[in-house]
């Protein structure tokens, strides 16, 4: 039970201020892409691959051919986080994608009042979500996307489920473009995530004998009772961001991005990030990323110093990546990101992607 409790205490205390502890399925707030996490999760406007449907479903509209992405990380308290995504461009119809993520708390020892060191039994707890995504470009400068996802939470024999919707758009402009075209101009992105039904836990673990008359003799202690849990909202998140390319050359480029987040279980915050990429031999590319996540969220961290400036309550992130060109413009890439989660330590995320044009 330890890892499960630590996870929920972490989101209730470290990452919440006004409505902490009022949402369920908080694993949906944890990023699944090394690219995005390395850039401080300032990614809603530059999402452009299959894994990026988590940040903005409109990302799929920019894909060509088929893409497959896999991400894995060992989160705090030995929690395993795994996700896989795929997307296929279907001509003028648009792009269809599938996404799955599993948040596994592992095996937990059963204890009770009489056996506080364990009964010899164990159980598992995990949370998972699966989604289908559609993305399409209506014109060359405007893309939209939508995801429908199924969400499940399991604690031994107790479960909860919900259905949610993600919506997103990406607008490409000529502003700040050094080549006077939309490809290298400012991009603006917006998305809303996890808009859906509420969750309520139910199952045989909530059934217990209850003594309805404690002060009277009799067999009332064998009366079957059931704990009735409350309905909990999902972690609704609205993201809005913009990105620019101040450097664009034949073998290198620089992206700067910023996102504003408005969640329903926390105060507003800002994420900023950057990515420097350069082409090495044979069309292969190397990426360097860094960012600041959660600027303005109280209690998330102490002040973070970056480039000589102090940012209150922000987490510093780093990332690197490599993409190798295969035959006929097919590509395979691997990315790594690192971030601090305050008093609970550091977290690393590894992602792999395959692009078949």
Image (spheres, helix red, strand yellow):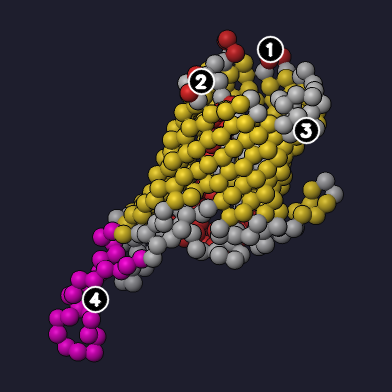
Residue 114 position (above or below residue 195): below
Residue at which label 4 appears = 210
User: Does residue 231 appear left or right of residue 321 in this picture?
Assistant: left
Q: Residues within 10 Å of mark 1 (few under 14, many from 20)?
A: few
Marks 3/4 in contact by CB < 8 Å: the verdict is no
Marks 2/1 in contact by CB < 8 Å: the verdict is no
- In the rendered structure, find residue 92 and report the number of the disc placed on it: 2
Find numbered disc 4 in the image and state the secondary structure of the residue it sits on. Answer: strand
Residue at which label 3 appears = 175
Find numbered disc 1 in the image and state the secondary structure of the residue it sits on. Answer: helix
Q: Which quadrant would the C terminus be assigned to in this image?
A: top right
Residue at which label 1 appears = 282
Give coordinates of residue 105: x percent, y percent.
43, 50
Quick check: can you spot residue 3? Answer: no
Q: Residues within 10 Å of mark 3 (few under 14, many from 20)?
A: some
Marks 3/1 in contact by CB < 8 Å: the verdict is no
Give coordinates of residue 252: x percent, y percent.
77, 23
Residue drawn at (61%, 26%), measured in percent from left and top? Answer: 139
- The foreground one among 18 and 68 is 18
Which range of residues does the magenta coloring cover?
203-229
Q: CA distance from mark 2 to mark 3?
A: 28 Å
């Amino acid at each position: 039970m330890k890892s499960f409790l630590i996870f929920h205490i972490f989101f209730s205390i470290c990452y919440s201020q006004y409505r902490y502890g009022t949402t369920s399925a908080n694993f949906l707030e944890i990023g699944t892409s090394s690219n995005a996490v390395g850039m401080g999760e300032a990614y809603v406007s530059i999402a452009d691959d299959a894994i990026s449907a988590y940040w903005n479903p409109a990302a799929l509209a920019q894909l060509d051919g088929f893409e497959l992405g896999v991400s894995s990380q060992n989160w705090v308290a030995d929690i395993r986080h795994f996700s896989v995504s795929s997307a296929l461009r279907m001509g003028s119809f648009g792009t269809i994608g599938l996404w799955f993520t599993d948040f596994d708390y592992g095996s937990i020892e059963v204890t009770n009042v009489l056996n506080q060191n364990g009964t010899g039994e164990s159980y598992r707890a995990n949370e998972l979500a699966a989604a289908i995504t559609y993305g399409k470009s209506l014109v060359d400068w405007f893309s939209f996307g939508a995801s429908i996802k199924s969400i499940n939470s399991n604690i031994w024999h107790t479960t909860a489920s919900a259905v949610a919707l993600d919506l997103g758009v990406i607008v490409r402009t000529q502003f700040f473009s050094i080549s006077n075209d939309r490809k290298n101009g400012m991009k603006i992105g917006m998305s809303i995530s996890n808009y859906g039904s509420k969750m309520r836990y139910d199952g045989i673990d909530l059934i217990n004998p209850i003594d309805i008359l404690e002060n009277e003799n009799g067999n009332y202690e064998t009366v079957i009772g059931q704990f009735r849990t409350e309905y909990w909202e999902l972690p609704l998140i609205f993201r809005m961001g913009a990105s620019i390319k101040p450097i664009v050359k034949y073998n290198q480029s620089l992206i700067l991005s910023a996102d504003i987040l408005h969640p329903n279980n926390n105060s507003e915050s800002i994420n900023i990030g950057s990515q420097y990429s350069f082409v090495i031999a044979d069309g292969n590319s190397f990426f360097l990323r860094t960012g600041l996540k959660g600027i303005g969220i109280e209690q998330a961290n102490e002040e973070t110093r970056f480039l000589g400036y102090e940012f209150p309550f922000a987490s510093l992130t780093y990332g690197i990546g490599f993409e190798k060109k295969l035959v006929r413009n097919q590509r395979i890439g691997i990315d790594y990101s690192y971030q601090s989660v305050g008093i609970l330590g550091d977290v690393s995320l590894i992602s792999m992607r395959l692009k078949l044009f």
